[in-house]
Amino acid sequence: MSADLCHKKELLKSFYCVYSDWVKRFPLACRKGCAACCTQSVTMTSLEGEIVLDFIKVQGREKWLRAELAESIPGKSRPLLTTNQFAEACLNQLDVDSNAFGCWDFTPCIFLEENICSIYEVRPFGCRSFGSVVRCTEDRTAEMAPIHLTVNIVLSQIIEHLNSDNGYWSGMMDILYSLVNSDLVKVYLMQARPVPGFLLEPQEVREIHVLLKKLREQSSDMGSLGDLIDNFMPIL
């Protein structure tokens, strides 16, 4: 494993910690055992997939994972735009077809065991970002503060940017399938894109400024990622 990949994995894990501390301010109704959001509609980067796969290998469950993935349908309900592609379209005031977001697939996540996540400690940000101040079900949508949603999008953009040098973005199943089947044509994956800018309301700038500072503090040498945060740091 390259030193750069190891560094990115550690950096991503530190970002998870920053987010975990930030989100504690909300009285979320999410509890162990509630799993309405644990579906196969989760998206992630190939970097996040590498972290999940590392965990599966340590557990000795790689054969099990291959068998589960063999039952999946590649490209099923996948979005057609990455988070940063969507942000770029919005910043350029382009219309985005609602079909670009794919269809929500309520099929339970393969890592869900008795309504408990079996990879909880390495789950991707797409899972970590789910949260609601009310108990949600298939019939009752989640509710979250607007700033919570904005931070979710900003951090999703930065995580995609972290993987934008030859990394990929897609549904969780497709990413994992590509990692355990090297002969797979990556037709169902999208190239991870760099951040084109952030979609912020004026009242959200200060909060995002604080968040970006905390992310910047996670490493004194973050290369292009550090430059990204510095370049987009709101001037207050």
Image: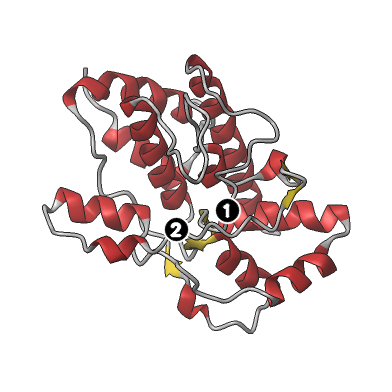
Q: In the image, residue 138 lies at what x, y percent?
A: 50, 46
Q: Where residue 163 sits in the image (x, y, percent)?
A: 48, 55
Disc 2/disc 1 C-alpha distance (Å):
9 Å
Name the mark on residue 39: 1
Of the pair 122 and 111, the residue shown nearer to us: 111
Q: Residue at x 28, y 19 (%)?
A: 206
Secondary element at image label 1: loop
Q: SS class of the residue under badge 2? A: loop
Query: Which quarter of the rendered picture does the C terminus lie within?
Result: top left
Residue drawn where x is 61% and y is 72% of the image: 178
Residue 11: image tag: none
User: In the depicted view, which residue is nearer to us: 140 or 28?
Assistant: 140
Do tag 2 and tag 1 residues touch (Cβ < 8 Å)? yes
Indicate the amino acid at tag 1: Thr
Residue that appears at 50% across and 35% down: 136
Residue hosting label 2: 104
Placement of 125 over or under 4, stated as above or below: above
